[in-house]
Image (cartoon, rainbow, N blue to C red):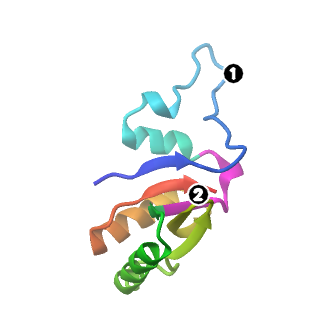
Amino acid sequence: MGVRVQDDGPGALPPARSTLGPTPAPDAATLPEADSQLALDGASDAAGRIYLQFGAFSAADTASKLAHRLNDGIGAVETRSARVERSGALYRVRIGPYLSRTDAVNAALRIEQETGMGSTVALR
């Protein structure tokens, strides 16, 4: 069970690096998964653009079916609803936005425990 971090938005910023100390802070790519979540949580500029993505499909009907299955299963653990968003030729199934990556990861874990469906943390 794990949550991946993905930034597919235009103008996405690279992970912040410390320039104050003698040793720069490690970036998320070099940290174990749990530590990378902690390192990325400080990105306050992403607030309101953080989503959970459960899939991206070329067929709107397939995406819609997944969104309905998610919504049927998450009522007890999540107040937000899964929605289908068109992005170019793809239909993305997403839940959000969340104020922080920590909020999104916590929701992803609750949803996965309830439904068995994994997600990716994505910036929009």
Asked if residue 31 is positioned above or below residue 117 in the image, the reply reads above
For the record, the magenta segment spans: 42-52
Any magenta on residue 59? Answer: no
Residue sitting nearer the eye, 33 or 92:
92
The residue lying at 49 percent from left, 34 percent from top is 28
- Is label 2 or label 1 in front? 2
Q: Earlier in the sequence, mark 2 or mark 1?
A: 1
Query: Residue 78's x, y, as percent?
Result: 45, 78
> Going 29% across and 74% down the picture, which residue do you hit?
115
- The x and y percentages for residue 97 are 60, 67
- Which residue in the protein does label 1 denote? 20
**Any mark on residue 100, and which?**
2
Residue visible at 34% across and 61% down?
Answer: 118
Residue 98 visible, this orientation? no
Image marks 2 and 1: residues in contact by CB distance under 8 Å: no
Mark 2, secondary structure of its residue? loop
